[in-house]
Image (cartoon, rainbow, N blue to C red):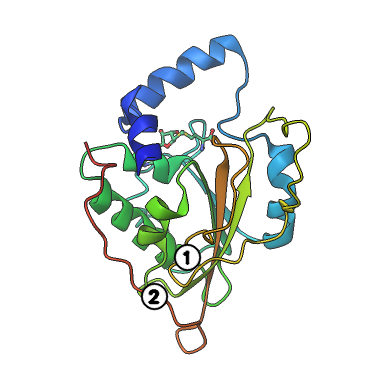
Amino acid sequence: MFRDVSACSTYNYGDSLYWDARYIQEANCGFFDWYQRYSALRPFVRKYISPSSRVLMVGCGNADIQMDVRDMSYFPDESFESVIDKGTLDSLMCGTGASISATQMLGEVNRLLLKPGGVYMLITYGDPTVRMPHIKRPVYSWNIDLYVIPKPGFQRPYGSTATNSLLEPIPTTEKGLLPPDYVIEDPDSHFIYVCKKMDETTHDTISIHPLVDDAMQR
Ligand SMILES: C[S@@+](CC[C@H](N)C(=O)[O-])C[C@H]1O[C@@H](n2cnc3c(N)ncnc32)[C@H](O)[C@@H]1O
């Protein structure tokens, strides 16, 4: 939770007007990539998303179609094989009514994904303690693979003996949390949650997280 509080408090990340202004400003300074460059994400995209599939990228400032992710009724049910979200749920989590907004957005994502097999790829700064309560819910029937990737530019400390492979999903606890002995090398790491929509009859036993109004709400 601390990560969310600290990330939200500096700027108005939950306000879409903040982003509109920022895109205008950044356009004058050149291109920027939020969180990660595509080169770091490419292995995950290739692993989970077929090039010929219908993909929806949410929260893109320069998209052809502008809509609120909490109401994407423009699209019929099961319109997409994949939904990619880099920082959009995070933005909602910084706004007022964060939990309600997240539930609305994730409900829409779930509705738009093909069943079974549709993939929601969430790229976020939110660690499992603050994201799993929202995404690991029986109502979604999502099987979730979790990855941790360091912030661009992170250098392993000299002498580090870490052997974690960035490309292998982390075996999580029953609640979807990192195992107690898992060490995150870079405290500014990002997280990738690959949520695969299952058939209700085949999904694993999913533990229930209470959806609390956590510290992400201001
Ligand atoms: C952290 S930025 C990420 C931008 C982009 N996805 C990227 O990776 O660079 C968050 C984005 O979420 C968008 N956003 C925030 N609330 C939204 C909402 N309710 N509906 C649609 N987009 C929203 C903002 O306009 C902004 O483009």
Judging depth in this view, the residue of 89 and 153 nearest the camera is: 153
Specify whether 152 is left or right of 25.
Answer: right
Identify residue type, mark 2. Answer: Ser
Question: What percent of the width, then of the height, locates residue 20?
Answer: 40, 23
Extreme residue toward the front, this view: 159
Q: Residue 31's mark?
A: none
SS class, disc 1 = loop
Please, is residue 95 above or below residue 82 in the view?
Answer: above
Does residue 61 show up? Answer: yes
Q: Are marks 1 and 2 in contact (CB under 8 Å)?
A: yes
Please, is residue 66 above or below residue 183 in the view?
Answer: above
Quadrant housing residue 73: bottom left
Q: Is mark 2 within 8 Å of ligand 1?
A: no
Q: Which residue is mark 2?
A: 207
Identify residue type, mark 1. Answer: Gly
Question: What percent of the width, then of the height, locates residue 137?
Answer: 37, 69
Specify whether 86 is left or right of 9.
Answer: right
Specify whether 161 is left or right of 55.
Answer: right
Question: What percent of the width, then of the height, locates residue 152?
Answer: 67, 31
Please identify the quadrant where the C terminus is shown: top left
Q: Which residue is mark 1?
A: 176
At 59% across and 55% down in the image, what residue appears? Answer: 182
Quadrant housing residue 38: top right
Mark nearer the N terminus (1 vs 2):
1
Question: What percent of the width, then of the height, locates residue 156?
Answer: 73, 34
At 32% across and 67% down in the image, what residue appears? Answer: 209
Q: Quadrant of ligand 1?
A: top left
Specify whether 189 is left or right of 65.
Answer: right
Please, is residue 4 above or below residue 169 in the view?
Answer: above
The residue carrying pointer 1 sits among few (fewer than 14), some (14 to 19) or many (20 or more) residues within 10 Å by Cα, namely: many
Please, is residue 78 above or below residue 40 in the view?
Answer: below
SS class, disc 2 = loop
